[in-house]
Image: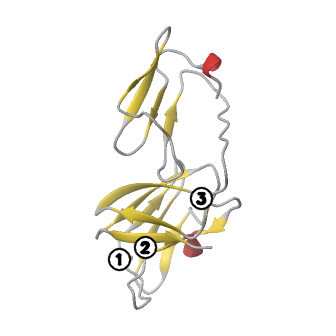
Amino acid sequence: MQLSSLQGADQVKNQFEFAEYYDGFGFYGTLSSMSADVMFAVKTASEATLTVTGAPVALPKSVTLYRGWTWVPCPYQTAVQLADALTYESSAGTSLYAAGDQFKSQFEFAEFYAGFGFYGTLTTVEPGKGYRVKTSEAGTASFAV
């Protein structure tokens, strides 16, 4: 998205901060920078193309999962199966996902079932997309290599 294509009321936000674009002024809000560490949501008044530039993310990549919902990015360069994407395990290698934990994209979701894994329409995580992860407990997860 080029600055010339922005209109008043266009917004960018992450889980905890936001910025809104004002014609003749620019962005105003608590969000002052973007990184590959978090997911961002972008709302535009009209259709726009968002171009992201930078270096590929070094994997494995650790992320903090909060109890409840956490916004996470997809650090991969190609689509990865959900079951292989975000490892949330104890030091002994036991999965910390619990029944009812969820993964959601803008249009798809999957829910975790004990003894089975994630089930739903969301089967892969894809570059350029962000996800909301709901867990019953806080912890550290890792995007695998």
**Mark 1 packing: few (<14 Cα in 10 Å), some, or many (20+)?**
some
Q: Nearer the viewer, residue 136 or 29?
A: 29
Residue 56 lies in quadrant: bottom right
Q: Which mark is residue 75?
A: 3
Residue 72, percent from left and from top: 47, 56
| C-alpha span from label 3 to label 2 | 22 Å
Distance of mark 1 from mark 2, alpha carbons?
Answer: 7 Å
Q: Secondary structure at mark 3?
A: loop
Q: Position of residue 15 (x, y in %)?
A: 37, 46
* Helix, strand or loop status at disc 1: loop
Mark 3 or 2: the one toward you: 3
Q: Residue at x 37, y 79 (%)?
A: 96
Do the CB atoms of the residues marked 3 and 2 lie less than 8 Å apart? Answer: no
In the picture, the disc for residue 112 is 2
How many numbered discs sit on the rendered protein?
Answer: 3
- The residue tagged 1 is 98
Q: CA distance from mark 3 to mark 1?
A: 24 Å
In the rendered image, the quadrant that contains the N terminus is: top right
Q: Amino acid at mark 3?
A: Pro
